[in-house]
Image (cartoon, rainbow, N blue to C red):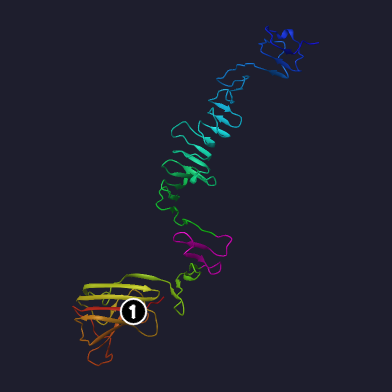
């Protein structure tokens, strides 16, 4: 038989050399210090009561004993690693969440740097802190159902790929795409000469819709394509009525409910032109002024000319209209509102634009109660001033 395996309040030490190996049925040691020898190196089913075990607490080395402190933390070095039963702490002795890295409370997971400029990552943080970056839920307005990316510092937030900045949210909340200096709530920049700054696609729709609104609520205007066959761009009001259309081939159609038919504007242009006497002559001028507005193919060309010294055989025409006229089969009129020191004494004077031409010719009367008595009269002389407007249809 082996020796008894239950010891009471013994006062002597019993070396393992006096014990056999029959300890696998359990060993109870009371309020006695028992010295164990080197014969038995493995004990099974051992219960220790009121026993004190001392281990190295500066670190957890190989074959060292890891124990719980008086607060219940499993620890070797509490400032490096601790487990308190439900939470794990690295770099903290008092973890308050399932995994806490760093001596900070309130985060489910927090990676941080002891450096002032160190980067930080927080997941699921309910506590607000400054000068840190957070990814989490529950920050905004104290609610728990909002996901967010947060930067507590007064600084920009950058997003990059391939080591290149692609998007930035500055400290004022402006978003910049392909720019580091957004000056609008959304600034999109294209660096390529033929690259679109932004693209809006509806891949599963038969046509494209972009809603424009002022304030919150319903859209005030839609910009819509007409479909894959027409490909025009249409502007539709909130009531569903089309108010304007840009044709696929160019030109603008205005939809006006008071008109019997729609009007099309395919071009609008303004500019200047220079009225002259016979081109190539040595006539000198005191002033030459011309302005025009072209809407579609209709031209409104104002002119004012004063001759200084005339030196030409042709004094019956004005040259240099800004566009060649349409061959309408008849002349197109041009009112003359003022003349002085004309080469002929007129009772009235009118102009007309010839077909397929940039010339302005004249017709006149020289006595009272006359119809047109002269076609192509001599109009210009030294000191002549003529002011009028050519209104005609251009040849395109």
Task: Answer above or below: position of 346 versus 6.
Answer: below
Q: Measured from the top left, where is residue 36 in percent x and y?
A: 68, 10
Q: Quadrant of the N terminus?
A: top right
Q: Measured from the top left, where is residue 214 in percent x and y?
A: 44, 61
Q: Residue at x 70, y 19 (%)?
A: 47
Q: Measured from the top left, where is residue 102 in percent x and y?
A: 51, 31
Element at label 1: strand
- Judging depth in this view, the residue of 104 and 310 nearest the camera is 104
Residue 127 visible in the displayed image: yes
Which residue in the rendered view is the most extreme toward the bottom? 369
Task: Answer above or below: position of 132 versus 15.
Answer: below
The residue at which mark 1 appears reads as 391
Residue 380 visible in the displayed image: no
- Taking the magenta stretch, the answer to whether it contains residue 57 is no
Q: How many marks?
A: 1
Q: Which residues are magenta?
A: 202-231
Q: Measured from the top left, where is residue 115 in percent x and y?
A: 45, 31
- Taking the magenta stretch, the answer to whether it contains residue 207 is yes
Q: Residue at x 73, y 19 (%)?
A: 45
Which residue in the rendered view is the most extreme toward the right? 1
Q: Residue at x 29, y 75 (%)?
A: 302
Principal SS element in the magenta part?
loop
How packed is label 1: few (under 14 Cα within 10 Å), some, or many (20 or more)? Answer: many
- Judging depth in this view, the residue of 252 and 223 nearest the camera is 223
Task: Answer above or below: position of 295 versus 88.
Answer: below
């Amino acid at each position: 038989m082996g020796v008894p395996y239950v010891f009471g309040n013994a006062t002597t030490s019993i070396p393992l050399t006096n014990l056999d190996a029959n300890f696998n049925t359990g060993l109870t040691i009371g309020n006695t210090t028992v010295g164990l020898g080197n014969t038995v190196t493995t004990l099974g089913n051992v219960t220790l009561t009121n026993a004190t075990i001392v281990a190295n607490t500066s670190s957890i080395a190989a074959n060292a004993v890891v124990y719980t402190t008086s607060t219940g933390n499993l620890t070797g070095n509490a400032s490096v690693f601790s487990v308190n039963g439900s939470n794990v702490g690295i770099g903290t002795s008092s973890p308050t969440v399932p995994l806490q890295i760093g001596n900070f409370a309130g985060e489910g997971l927090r990676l941080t740097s002891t450096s002032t400029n160190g980067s930080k990552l927080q997941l699921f943080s309910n506590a607000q802190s400054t000068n840190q970056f957070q990814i989490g839920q529950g920050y905004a307005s104290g609610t728990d159902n909002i996901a967010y990316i947060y930067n507590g510092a007064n600084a920009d937030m950058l997003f990059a790929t391939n080591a290149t900045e692609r998007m930035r949210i500055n400290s004022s909340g402006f978003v910049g795409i392909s720019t580091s200096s957004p000056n609008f709530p959304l600034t999109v920049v294209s660096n390529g000469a033929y690259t679109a700054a932004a693209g809006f696609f509806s891949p599963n729709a038969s046509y494209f819709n972009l809603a424009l609104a002022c304030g919150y609520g319903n859209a005030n205007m839609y910009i819509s394509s007409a479909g894959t066959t027409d490909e025009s761009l249409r502007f539709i009001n909130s009531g569903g009525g089309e108010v304007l259309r840009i044709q696929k081939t160019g030109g603008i159609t205005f939809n006006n409910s008071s008109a019997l038919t729609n009007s099309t504007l395919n071009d609008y242009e303004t500019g200047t032109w220079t009225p002259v006497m016979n081109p190539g002559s040595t006539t000198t001028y005191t002033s030459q002024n011309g302005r025009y507005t072209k809407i579609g193919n209709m031209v409104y060309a104002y002119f004012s000319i004063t001759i200084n010294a005339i030196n030409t055989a042709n004094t019956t025409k004005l040259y240099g209209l800004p566009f060649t006229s349409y061959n309408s089969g008849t002349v197109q009129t041009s009112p003359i509102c003022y003349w002085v020191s004309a080469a002929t004494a007129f009772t009235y004077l009118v102009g007309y634009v010839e077909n397929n031409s940039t010339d302005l010719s004249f017709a006149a009367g020289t006595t009272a109660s006359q119809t047109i008595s002269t076609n192509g009269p001599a109009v210009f002389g030294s000191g002549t001033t003529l002011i009028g407007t050519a209104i005609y249809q251009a040849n395109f």
